[in-house]
Image (spheres, rainbow, N blue to C red):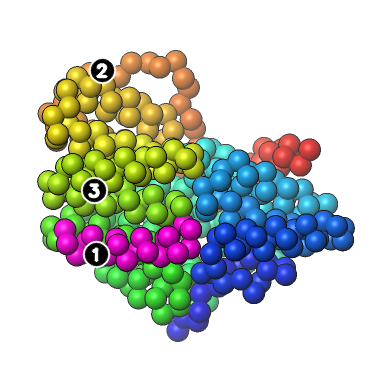
């Protein structure tokens, strides 16, 4: 039995905020409480209110402000000797790093956050950080490495009756099944996530689940009308709560649905909108996916084949450089779909980023993640200490 969803990242004097609070309201309340804590010299409270500020900025797509806020929260927590608060700040920083496409940094920060969460006795901070590691690996396309971790975190969330975390895990597992072609399994998991989120009043989780359902309904059933209706419902929630990233991904999915239906001009408009939104918030993964959809739509609308080939080749290099394995495979499929010859890959002179899911040893289990985090502690701590200066 699941209770009402809660937002553990809203801490200290901000625990009264709801998981469904408008991010604009969260930012205002967090900023006010942060200033009051700083005036009173309450470093622990400053760290916890600063966490809410960082998360509001991140979810609003305000990358620079979010970066400054999580680092300030870390410094305040360190000064207060609050290990659990340090873990939460690093979780926020790691989540932001993933959002920005800085996957090696995300692995380091989230790994240390998991270790500090355990050391500080905050099981929720530890769980959120492990979930962040799992999601990072999933986004990079290393399903074998993080599949078992998703299942483990789902079992833990179910056992504790944590609706929000259960919904997250179900959606992640569903996405992996969808991308592997197991549409019926994916649909069932997205449907369960939507039902739990709705009962628990988790509007953010519900909006993401509806997006997943719309995707499966479109690709499996070809039901464009129902898919667009589900996305329209989710879009309303995204706008009500100022969920900038979720809204951009919703618009990108609208483009996918319209493209599959052969409505290429409408798809182009949706992809262009999503592309602008992703660029405004500095989210490279979303930007690349929107560019891919836009390139395919423009090709169907008569764009010069050489321009399309150049665009797809550039996308392939970009995705390979930042370590998005599944998205890179999507470019290959687009080239095949459009009959684009793939020229041999040229060396761009840039060293590829490291830090993929496999390199962390994630698939072996939670113990290995924490062991890996421990070996990375010096590097990650240096990152935090550098931020603290």
Q: Is residue 304 above or below residue 382?
A: above
Which residue is under mark 3?
256
Q: Is residue 242 left or right of residue 118?
A: left
Which residue is under mark 1?
229
Q: Alpha carbon of mark 1 to alpha carbon of mark 2: how far?
A: 42 Å
Q: Is residue 34 above or below residue 329?
A: below
Most common secondary structure along the magenta stretch: helix
User: Tag 2, which secondary structure?
Assistant: loop
Which residue is under mark 2?
344
The mark nearer the N terminus, 2 or 3, is 3
Is residue 146 shown to the viewer in this render? no
Neighbours of disc 1 within 10 Å: few (<14), some (14-19), many (20+)? few
How far from the left and from the top, in percent, is residue 382?
72, 38
Q: Which residues are magenta?
A: 224-243
Circle count: 3
Q: Alpha carbon of mark 2 to alpha carbon of mark 3: how far?
A: 28 Å
If the image is split into quadrants, where does the N terminus sit?
bottom left
In the rendered image, residue 251 lying in the magenta stretch gets the answer no
Q: Residue at x 32, y 66 (%)?
A: 233
Furthest residue toward bottom: 1
Q: Nearer the viewer, residue 111 or 306?
A: 306
Q: Residue at x 44, y 33 (%)?
A: 322
How far from the left and from the top, in percent, is residue 64?
60, 41
User: Tag 3, which secondary structure?
Assistant: helix
Q: Nearer the viewer, residue 297 or 200?
A: 297
How far from the left and from the top, in percent, is residue 14?
68, 68
Q: Is residue 147 above or below residue 353?
A: below
């Amino acid at each position: 039995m699941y209770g009402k969803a809660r937002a553990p990242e809203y801490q200290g004097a901000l625990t009264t905020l709801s998981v469904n609070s408008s991010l604009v309201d969260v930012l205002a309340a967090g900023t006010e409480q942060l200033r009051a804590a700083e005036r009173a010299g309450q470093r622990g409270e400053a760290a916890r209110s600063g966490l809410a500020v960082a998360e509001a900025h991140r979810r609003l797509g305000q990358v620079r402000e979010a970066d400054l806020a999580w680092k300030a929260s870390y410094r305040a927590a360190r000064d207060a000797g609050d290990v659990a608060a340090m873990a939460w700040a690093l979780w926020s920083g790691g989540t932001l790093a993933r959002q920005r496409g800085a996957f090696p940094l995300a692995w380091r920060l989230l790994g240390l956050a998991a270790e500090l969460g355990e050391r500080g006795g905050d099981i929720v901070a530890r769980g959120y950080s492990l979930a962040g590691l799992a999601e990072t690996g999933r986004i990079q396309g290393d399903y074998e490495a993080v599949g078992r971790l998703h299942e483990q975190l789902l079992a833990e969330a179910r056992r504790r009756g944590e609706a929000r975390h259960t919904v997250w895990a179900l959606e992640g597992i569903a996405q992996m099944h969808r991308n592997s072609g197991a549409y019926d399994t994916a649909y069932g998991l997205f449907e369960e996530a939507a039902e739990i989120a709705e009962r628990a009043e988790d509007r953010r989780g519900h909006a993401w689940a509806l997006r997943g359902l719309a995707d499966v309904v479109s690709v499996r059933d070809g039901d464009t009308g129902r898919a667009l209706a589900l996305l329209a419902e989710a879009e309303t929630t995204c706008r009500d709560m100022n969920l900038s990233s979720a809204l951009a991904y919703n618009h990108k999915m609208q483009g996918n649905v319209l493209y599959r239906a052969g409505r290429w001009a409408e798809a182009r408009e949706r992809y262009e909108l999503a592309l602008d939104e992703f660029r405004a918030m500095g989210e490279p993964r979303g930007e690349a996916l929107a560019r891919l959809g836009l390139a395919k739509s423009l090709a169907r609308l008569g764009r010069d084949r050489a321009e399309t080939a150049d665009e797809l080749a550039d996308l392939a290099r970009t995705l390979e450089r930042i370590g998005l394995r599944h998205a890179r495979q999507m470019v290959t499929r687009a080239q095949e779909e459009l009959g684009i010859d793939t020229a041999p890959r040229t060396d761009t002179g840039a060293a590829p980023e490291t830090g993929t899911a496999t390199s962390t040893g994630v698939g072996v289990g939670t113990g290995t993640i924490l062991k890996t985090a421990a070996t990375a502690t010096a590097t990650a701590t240096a990152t935090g200490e550098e931020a603290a200066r």
